[in-house]
Image (cartoon, rainbow, N blue to C red):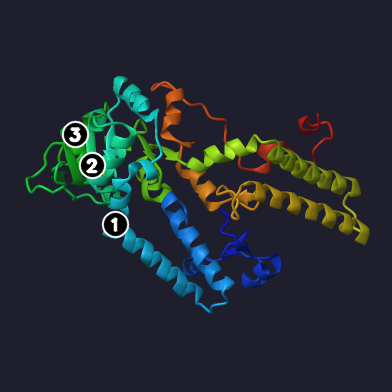
C-alpha cells in the first residue's frame, strides 16, 4: 500500500494466507526503508507487467513441479532475461515487423493531434525507443505522414537522463537508415529526427520563449534554477505512460502539468458499472456502516465476548466481499489502484505527481484544446469527507435511500 505496508502477497499465482503473511513480516507488515530496498521491487508501469507475470509464472512452475529454488535467484534471472531481450532489440524488431498483431489501433489519435496543432500548441514527440521502432508504430496508428503533426521528433532520448542532464547535445538521425550524423545541432527543425539531448538543449534549439523570460539571462549556466525559465511553466502539458520514468521528474523538477496514460482505469470503470461489482461495493458499505452503528450503540463501555464475536463475524463478511471484488477484477492480483482496501503505492503516486490521468490519449478528443479542468477539492482526511464525526453515520444517509 502507499504506507509501505504489505497488505497482500502472492507466491506464484496463489495468494499467501494471512497467517503466513503475518509470520513473514513480523505481524505489523510495515517495512523500514532498508527492508523495502532489500525485499521489494516496485512494479509501476506497463513494462513492469511483463516482469510481474513472468516472475509469477516462473515461481508457479517450480511450485507445481516441486522443484527447489531460490526466490531471489529466480527474480534475478527473470529480470536479466527481460533486460537482455529489451536491449538486444529482438523484441522491437519482431513487433515492428508485425504491427497489426502487437499494436492496438488508435482511430482518434490523429484527430486529437490535429486539434492540438490547429489551436496553436507546439507538439514535441520524445521516446526512449529507436526511431525505426517509433516510425513503425506511429505509421500504423496515425499514418505515413505522422511526423507532420509534430514540431520536434526525438527518439532514443535516454529518459530519465533527458531530464536530469544539462550538457547533453542533440544529434540528428537519418530517417532512411537510422544512422546518427556527426554535425552539430543548433536548431531543431520540423520534419527531421533527433536523438539524445536534454531539456536545457531543447529550450535553446527550439527558441522556447515565455512571456516572463525578459528577466532571464541569456548566458545563465543553470536553466533549472531560473525562475523565469519556460521549463518551469505549468502551461507545458506532459503526457506519458511511465509514472516514474517520465512523469515524476516532469512534475517535481519543472512543475509541468502532467497527464498519465493508464489503460487500467478504463477497464476498471467498465467493471464498476456492472451489477455484480455494485452489489459487492454496496454490501461492504452496508456492513461497515453496521459496525459503526453497532459500536455507537455499545457506547464507551468495555465490550463483552458476545459483542466482540458479532464484530468479528461482520469483519469476516466484509473480507469475503472484498475477496469477491478482487475476483471480479479477472486477475489474481486485483486492482493496481488498491492494496486490498487501501490505496496502492501506484495510486498514491498517481495522485501526487499527475494532474490528469486517462485510459487513452484519445480521451482528449472529448475536450477543447483550451478546456480548463476544475477538479473536486481533494479530501485526504476522514473529517473532511464525513464531517466533524467520521465514525458516526446516520441511518438516513443517502446510501440507504
Residue at image mark 1: 90
- Mark 2, other Cα within 10 Å: few <14 / some 14–19 / many ≥20: many
Residue closest to the eye, 77 or 93: 93
Image x and y of residue 203, in percent: 21, 37
- Mark 3, other Cα within 10 Å: few <14 / some 14–19 / many ≥20: some
Image position of 66 with respect to 346: above or below? below
Residue that lies at the very extreme toward the left in this rendered image: 183
Kindly identify the residue that appears in the image at 51 percent across and 63 percent down.
57
The quarter of the image holding the C terminus is top right
Res 79 → quadrant: bottom left
Residue 15 vs residue 40: left or right? right
Residue 44 vs residue 184: left or right? right
* Of the two numbered discs 2 and 3 in the rendering, the one whose residue sits closer to the viewer: 2
Image x and y of residue 52, in percent: 48, 59
In terms of sequence position, does the residue under pointer 1 or pointer 2 come before the other? Answer: 1
Q: Which mark is residue 154?
A: 2
Contact (CB < 8 A) between labels 1 and 3? no
Q: State the SS at label 3.
A: loop
Q: State the SS at label 2.
A: strand
Image position of 119 with respect to 131: above or below? above
Image position of 53 with respect to 285: above or below? below
Image position of 64 with respect to 87: above or below? below
* Of the two numbered discs 1 and 3 in the rendering, the one whose residue sits closer to the viewer: 1
Residue at image mark 3: 206
Q: Label 1 to label 3, Cα distance in Å?
A: 34 Å
In this rendering, does residue 226 appear at all? no
Kindly identify the residue that appears in the image at 29 percent across and 46 percent down.
96
Q: Label 2 to label 3, Cα distance in Å?
A: 13 Å
Residue closest to the eye, 12 or 316: 12
Amino acid at each position: 500500500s502507499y504506507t509501505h505496508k504489505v497488505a497482500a502477497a502472492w507466491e506464484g499465482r496463489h495468494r499467501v494466507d494471512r497467517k503466513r503473511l503475518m509470520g513473514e513480516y513480523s505481524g505489523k507488515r510495515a517495512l523500514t526503508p532498508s527492508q523495502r530496498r532489500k525485499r521489494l521491487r516496485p512494479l509501476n508501469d506497463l513494462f513492469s507487467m511483463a516482469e510481474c507475470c513472468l516472475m509469477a509464472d516462473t515461481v508457479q512452475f517450480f511450485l507445481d513441479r516441486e522443484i527447489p529454488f531460490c526466490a531471489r535467484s529466480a527474480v534475478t534471472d527473470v529480470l536479466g532475461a527481460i533486460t537482455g531481450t529489451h536491449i538486444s532489440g529482438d523484441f522491437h524488431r519482431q513487433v515492428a515487423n508485425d504491427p497489426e498483431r502487437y499494436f492496438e489501433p488508435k482511430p482518434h489519435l490523429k484527430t486529437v493531434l490535429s486539434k492540438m496543432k490547429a489551436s496553436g500548441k507546439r507538439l514535441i514527440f520524445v521516446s526512449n525507443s529507436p526511431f525505426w521502432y517509433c516510425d513503425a508504430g506511429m505509421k500504423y496508428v496515425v499514418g505515413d505522414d505522422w511526423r507532420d503533426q509534430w514540431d520536434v521528433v526525438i527518439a532514443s532520448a535516454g529518459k530519465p537522463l533527458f531530464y536530469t542532464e544539462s550538457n547533453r547535445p542533440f544529434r540528428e538521425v537519418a530517417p532512411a537508415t537510422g544512422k546518427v550524423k556527426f554535425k552539430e545541432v543548433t536548431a531543431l527543425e520540423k520534419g527531421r529526427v533527433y536523438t539524445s539531448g536534454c531539456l536545457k538543449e531543447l529550450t535553446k534549439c527550439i527558441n522556447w520563449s515565455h512571456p516572463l523570460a525578459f528577466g532571464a539571462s541569456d548566458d545563465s549556466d543553470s536553466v533549472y534554477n531560473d525562475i523565469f525559465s519556460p521549463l518551469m511553466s505549468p502551461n507545458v502539458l506532459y503526457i506519458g505512460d511511465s509514472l516514474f520514468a517520465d512523469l515524476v521528474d516532469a512534475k517535481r523538477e519543472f512543475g509541468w502539468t502532467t497527464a498519465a496514460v493508464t489503460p487500467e482505469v478504463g477497464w476498471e470503470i467498465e467493471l464498476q458499472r456492472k451489477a455484480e461489482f455494485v452489489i459487492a461495493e454496496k454490501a461492504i458499505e452496508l456492513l461497515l456502516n453496521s459496525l459503526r452503528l453497532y459500536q455507537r450503540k455499545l457506547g464507551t463501555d468495555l465490550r463483552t465476548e458476545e459483542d466482540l464475536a458479532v464484530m468479528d463475524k461482520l469483519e469476516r463478511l466484509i473480507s469475503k466481499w472484498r475477496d469477491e471484488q478482487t475476483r471480479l477484477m479477472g486477475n489474481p492480483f486485483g486492482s493496481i489502484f488498491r492494496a486490498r482496501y487501501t490505496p496502492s503505492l501506484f495510486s498514491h503516486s498517481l495522485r501526487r505527481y499527475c494532474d490528469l490521468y486517462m485510459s487513452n490519449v484519445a480521451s482528449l478528443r472529448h475536450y477543447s484544446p483550451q478546456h480548463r479542468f476544475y477538479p473536486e477539492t481533494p479530501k485526504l482526511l476522514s473529517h473532511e469527507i464525513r464531517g466533524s464525526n467520521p465514525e458516526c453515520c446516520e441511518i438516513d444517509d443517502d446510501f440507504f435511500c
